[in-house]
Amino acid sequence: MSPPLIAPSILAADFARLGDEIAAVETAGADMIHVDVMDGHFVPNLTIGPAVVKALRPHVKTILDVHLMIAPVDPFIGAFRDAGADILTVHPEAGPHIHRTLQAIRACGAKAGVSLNPGTPVEVLEPVMDLVDLVLVMSVNPGFGGQAFIDSQLRKIEQVRRRIDASGRNILLEVDGGVTDKTAPACLAAGAQALVAGTAVFKGGPAAYADNIKALKRAGGGQGAF
């Protein structure tokens, strides 16, 4: 089993010093930087918009992984891509036409992701697998950090893994929600390749980031690729 790619969620970082926090987790071994964009409508929380992502972009040396928990999502795709997002992940429920949304993401040069909430069936992927670069399985209901991992989502990770393998395409399988060094092994055993972690990475401050990331990576074995 390869060690997972680690995508620290800046939702758990110190917002007063985000540039420094990003530099610290990248130095500590982060593979991607995960940005949770929430609109207070699609999910019950309000975070950041394109202007903040643009301000963060010069500080990100790795992949900028932007998760759009907003509805409607289509009007903002161009703005977040222009702000510097490498990956744009959207929810099927966030617009009337997920196929068109994914086409728009790829047309602007970003990698396209689909996020599945705990109540979203895996079957929604079938008509769009040819447009997907990443599948994000939410192991909590989106909206807030620090929630407990929902064990039933392990079966969903397994189901997504089978669909990805059957497609023959290089699609990254990512998990977000309640990810810790205790829950990570089960996620990886089910087929995940990338782990989004907020509290598990940022707890203890910068001096602890390297050990926190190592603890998550030890759940697997060589380096994943995307």
Image (cartoon, helix red, strand yellow):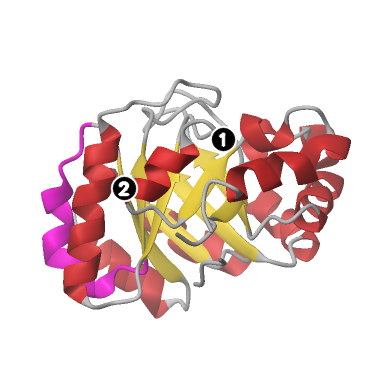
Specify the amino acid type for callout 1: Asp
7, 115: nearer the viewer:
7
Q: Main secondary structure of the magenta part?
A: helix
- Number of labels in the image equals 2
Q: Which residue is mark 1?
A: 181
Tag 2's secondary structure?
helix
In the depicted view, which residue is nearer to us: 151 or 85? 151
- Residue 140 locus on image (x, y percent): 38, 29
Residue at x 60% of width, y 43% of height:
216
Residue 176 picture location, percent across and down = 45, 40
Q: Residues within 10 Å of mark 2 (few under 14, many from 20)?
A: some
| Residue at 30%, 68% in the rendered image | 132
- Residue at (56, 35) in percent of width and height: 181
Residue 197 versus residue 190 in the image, above or below: above
Q: Which residue is mark 2?
A: 190
Between discs 1 and 2, the one toward the N terminus: 1
Residue 157 lies left or right of residue 216; in this view the side is left
Answer whether residue 95 is visible to the viewer in this image: no
Q: Position of residue 125 (x, y in %)?
A: 18, 57
Range shown magenta: 119-133
Tell me the element at label 1: loop
